[in-house]
Image (spheres, grey):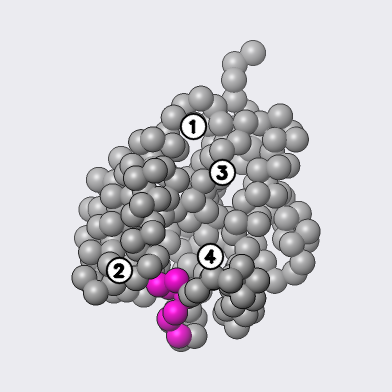
């Protein structure tokens, strides 16, 4: 029997929506169903990309402007794809990635106001047409997401990162930009209400992902 083909799933959303939690829960359920699963994240996911991540989230690149940030995200993504994502997909694994190109479209594009044609050119170069099979957009009201992010940082003793330091109006724009992408690309994107308890959200994530996993077999 032929091995199942690889499947690329991305999780997107603003701060505090629970992407890492739901990525881990989805991976656990897929493994229980017999699939090989790789979980990864952006920026990051490979040694070189993780070094770029540290630079970006510290805010060190911010003084160079949003286009410079977009260049760094693209560089990290190209390495991540080459060293981590594509080899896993080629082996038949399900790859679950916490953020991907939609985050660049939102944070550097719709909110950061880098021209869409520049981001499209960077996307073509950095991804070489590797696209998610399914994108799960986890959505919560902005106030809830920011409170969750604050509570998480406090529990971990972490400082705010480059993007968490922005004001509420900024995060409202982020939320609407993600929802606009989902409305524009319904064949790829599924919006999941991430307001309930994690177990309830995990069940909704599984329902959204299950059909894509079956098709990929």
Mark pair 1, 3: CA separation: 12 Å
Q: At x 25% / y 53%, what residue is drawn?
A: 122
Which of the two marks, 2 or 4, is nearer to us in this view? 2
Q: Residue furthest top?
A: 1
Spatial CA distance of label 4 from label 3 is: 17 Å
Residue position marked by numbered label 2 in the rendering: 60
Instruction: From the top left corner, tell me how far across and down residue 81 is, in percent.
Output: 38, 40
Residues at circles 1 and 4 in contact by the CB criterion of under 8 Å: no
- Nearest-to-viewer mark from 1 and 3: 3
- What residue do we see at 70% from left, 49% from top? 25
Q: Which range is magenta? A: 161-167
Q: Please give the residue where the numbered disc 1 appears in the rendered image.
A: 89
Question: Is the residue under label 3 in contact with that under label 4 (CB below 8 Å)?
Answer: no
* Residue position marked by numbered label 4 in the rendering: 13
Residue at numbered disc 3: 39
Q: Earlier in the sequence, mark 1 or mark 4?
A: 4
Q: Which of the 4 image quadrants contains residue 118?
A: bottom left
**Residue at coordinates 71% horizontally, 42% vertically from top-left?**
28
Q: Residues within 10 Å of mark 1 (few under 14, many from 20)?
A: some
Q: Earlier in the sequence, mark 4 or mark 3?
A: 4
- Which numbered mark, 4 or 3, is in the foreground of this view? 3
Does residue 189 appear anywhere in the picture? Answer: no
* Principal secondary structure, stretch drawn in magenta: loop
Where in the figure is residue 48, as x and y percent of width and height? 34, 45
Crowding around mark 2 (Cα neighbors within 10 Å: few <14, some 14 to 19, many 20+) is: few
Q: Characterize the local packing of mark 3: few (<14), some (14-19) or many (20 or more) Cα atoms within 10 angstroms.
A: some
Residue 42 in sight from this viewpoint: yes
| For residue 15, side relative to residue 30 (left or right) | left
From mark 1 to mark 4, how far is it between C-alphas?
23 Å
């Amino acid at each position: 029997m032929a091995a199942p083909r690889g499947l690329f799933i991305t999780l997107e959303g603003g701060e505090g929506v629970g992407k890492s939690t739901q990525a881990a829960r989805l991976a656990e359920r897929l493994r229980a169903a017999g699939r090989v699963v790789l979980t990864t994240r952006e920026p990051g996911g490979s040694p070189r990309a993780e070094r770029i991540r540290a630079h970006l989230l510290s805010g060190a690149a911010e003084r160079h402007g949003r286009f410079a940030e977009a260049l760094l995200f693209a560089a990290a993504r190209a390495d991540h794809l080459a060293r981590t994502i594509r080899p896993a997909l080629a082996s038949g694994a399900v790859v679950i990635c916490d953020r991907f190109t939609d985050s660049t479209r939102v944070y550097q594009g719709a909110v950061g106001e880098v021209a869409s044609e520049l981001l499209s050119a960077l996307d073509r170069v950095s991804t070489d047409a590797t696209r998610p099979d399914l994108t799960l957009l986890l959505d919560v009201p902005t106030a809830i997401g920011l409170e969750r992010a604050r509570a998480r940082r406090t529990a971990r003793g972490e400082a705010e990162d480059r993007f968490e330091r922005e004001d509420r109006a900024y995060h409202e724009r982020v939320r609407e930009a993600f929802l606009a992408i989902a409305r524009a690309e319904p064949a790829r994107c599924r919006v999941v209400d991430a307001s309930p308890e994690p177990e309830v959200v995990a069940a909704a994530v599984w329902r959204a992902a299950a059909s894509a996993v079956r098709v990929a077999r």
